[in-house]
Image: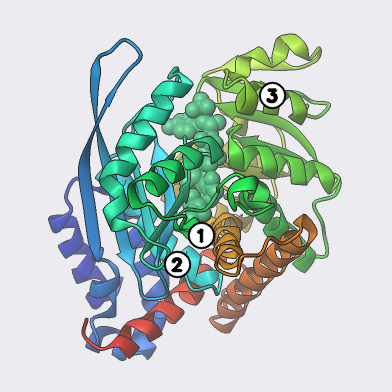
């Protein structure tokens, strides 16, 4: 690595020494930027890398709430506003027991570049809590969301910071959060949260957007190779929001999804996973995926196993960070896999990305491939601001255009620097340049 980014990474490591995920995310971006740093001395002169790798603000707060047994529970809440160069902080909230500042910072950092790639006026942020929604009653979820928003609402606003969902946060949680925001502020400020249910100002297609968008991106990549998703055998990790609608779009386009998973293990269904059944188990009953196999002859549940062991043409990691490692990628390649498209944020380890690139497989990084979710969130903000609600077809066609434009930008920069198949490079450079221009334009702020 060049001296300037390397010195910076060393400094970041010292100042954030218990944040390996954040350092992993920054490293990947800085590595990609090397060729353009040499050609653009302004990047160093204006301390652009220093400024984009230090969050503008980081809020941490205590969340006290009472469980159904009358016991007081204490969790920690976070909201990192990483960059408002391109617009209000925008990014989801994650409720999961593994959440810590490191997780939120890496996600917020990734979000800056992803949001820039959409071409829309949204900055980068992320938040969440170490609250574990599993096994909680609906009333407990509501009380937690109300307590969380009671601490966070001071910092939000449709022009300041606009949260949405992520792991453990869907339209139910957004409804409770929005309700509490409205109660506290006495304002019906619709654009302060996205991912709302449709009747409360939510956008059609927001629920499907991340998964659909990842498949639209995959289709663009394959089109470039004179190929398509149609007829492909696919594995999708996870069975939450992103995984479910990724699988749904794959099926719509004529692919077969043979395996899905959750944190308890994987199901393999060689004739094609029954997505209505998965949806009813995971989205409606909030149960475990092992209950799938007894309903579906010919399918099998593999406890504690990941989907990467199954033969496929395309793999879509849609669960969580670092869920696909170097050995697992080698297994995918040995089984004839053609490409990996990231629906989740940073699901592929750096070692695994190296293997994929060395072997010449297609690889779509999450900040490009999963940008459809936040893009439709921005469309939801547009609809709220103009008191409109667009049809499913309208939003879906805008989503397709946005994903095609992101793909185009990635390819443009990758080809310009003679790395025609390097989507990591293309995505990082395309996302960065727009932000760098903004940082410079504002002066020293
Ligand atoms: P959900 O909560 O709806 O689903 C998460 C899925 O991943 C579940 O199947 C869950 O299994 C599994 N999972 C979560 N954490 C772990 C873990 N530590 N180990 C193994 N499995 C795990 O979340 P989403 O679908 O919304 O998010 C999935 C990924 O996509 C995340 O990386 C998120 O950041 C990213 N993303 C989400 C967007 C959105 O709009 N929602 C937009 C862009 C990216 P179980 O049910 O057992 O917990
Ligand atoms: O990682 C992501 O892009 C999200 N969780 C969605 C963010 C949003 O604001 O819709």
Q: Tag 2's secondary structure?
A: helix
Q: Residue at x 35, y 30 (%)?
A: 144
According to the image, label 3 marks what residue?
280
Mark 3 or 2: the one toward you? 3
Instruction: Work out whether 265 lies above or below 223.
Output: above
In the visual, does 445 lie left or right of 89?
Answer: left
Marked residue nearer the N-terminal end (1 or 2) = 2
Q: Position of residue 60 (x, y in %)?
A: 21, 46
Q: Residue at x 61, y 58 (%)?
A: 372
Q: Position of residue 441 (x, y in %)?
A: 34, 89
The residue most toward the left is 14
Do the numbered discs 1 and 2 sit on residues whose CB atoms are within 8 Å?
Answer: yes
According to the image, label 1 marks what residue?
367
Instruction: Work out whether 85 lies above or below 304.
Output: below
Mark 1 or 3: the one toward you? 3
Is residue 24 visible in the rendered image? The answer is: yes
Q: Between residues 212 and 298, which one lies in front from this camera angle? A: 212
Number of numbered discs present? 3
Marked residue nearer the N-terminal end (1 or 3) = 3
Quarter where residue 444 is shown: bottom left
According to the image, label 2 marks what residue?
113
Is residue 426 visible in the rendered image? The answer is: no
Marked residue nearer the N-terminal end (3 or 2) = 2
């Amino acid at each position: 690595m060049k001296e300037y980014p390397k010195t910076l990474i060393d400094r970041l490591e010292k100042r954030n020494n218990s944040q390996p995920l954040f350092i992993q995310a920054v490293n990947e971006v800085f590595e990609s930027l090397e060729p353009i740093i040499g050609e653009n001395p302004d990047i160093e002169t204006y301390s652009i890398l220093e400024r984009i790798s230090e969050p503008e603000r980081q809020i941490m707060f205590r969340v006290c709430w009472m469980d159904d047994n009358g016991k007081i529970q204490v969790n920690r809440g976070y909201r990192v506003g990483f960059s408002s160069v391109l617009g209000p902080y925008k990014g989801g909230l994650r409720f999961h027991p593994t959440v810590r500042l490191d997780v939120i910072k890496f996600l917020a950092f990734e979000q800056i570049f992803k949001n820039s790639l959409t071409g829309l006026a949204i900055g980068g942020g992320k938040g969440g809590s170490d609250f574990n929604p599993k096994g909680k009653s609906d009333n407990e979820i509501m009380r937690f969301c109300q307590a969380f928003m009671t601490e966070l609402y001071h910092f939000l606003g449709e022009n300041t910071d606009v949260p949405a969902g992520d792991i453990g946060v869907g339209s139910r949680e957004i409804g409770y959060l929005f309700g509490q925001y409205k109660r506290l502020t006495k304002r019906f400020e619709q654009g302060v949260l996205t991912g709302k249910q449709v009747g409360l100002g939510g956008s059609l297609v927001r629920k499907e957007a991340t998964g659909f968008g990842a498949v639209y991106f995959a289709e663009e990549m394959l089109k470039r190779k004179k190929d398509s998703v149609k007829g492909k055998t696919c594995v999708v990790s996870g069975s939450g929001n992103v995984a479910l609608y990724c699988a749904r779009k794959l099926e719509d386009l004529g692919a077969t999804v043979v395996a899905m998973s959750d944190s308890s293990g994987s199901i393999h269904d060689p004739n094609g996973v029954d997505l209505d059944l998965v949806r009813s188990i995971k989205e409606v009953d909030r149960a475990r995926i092992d209950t799938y196999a007894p309903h579906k002859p010919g399918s099998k549940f593999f406890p504690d196993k990941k989907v990467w062991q199954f033969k496929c043409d395309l793999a879509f990691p849609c669960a969580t960070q670092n869920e696909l490692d170097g050995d697992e990628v080698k297994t995918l390649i040995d089984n004839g896999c053609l490409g990996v498209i990231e629906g989740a944020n940073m699901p592929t380890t750096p070692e695994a990305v190296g293997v994929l690139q060395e072997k010449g497989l297609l690889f779509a990084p999450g900040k490009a491939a999963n940008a459809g979710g936040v893009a439709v969130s921005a469309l939801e903000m547009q609809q709220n601001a103009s008191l409109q609600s667009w049809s499913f077809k309208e939003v879906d066609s805008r989503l397709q255009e946005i994903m095609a434009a992101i793909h185009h930008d990635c390819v443009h920069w990758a080809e310009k620097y003679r790395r025609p198949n390097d989507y990591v490079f293309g995505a990082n450079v395309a996302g960065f340049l727009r932000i760098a221009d903004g940082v410079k334009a504002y002066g020293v702020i």
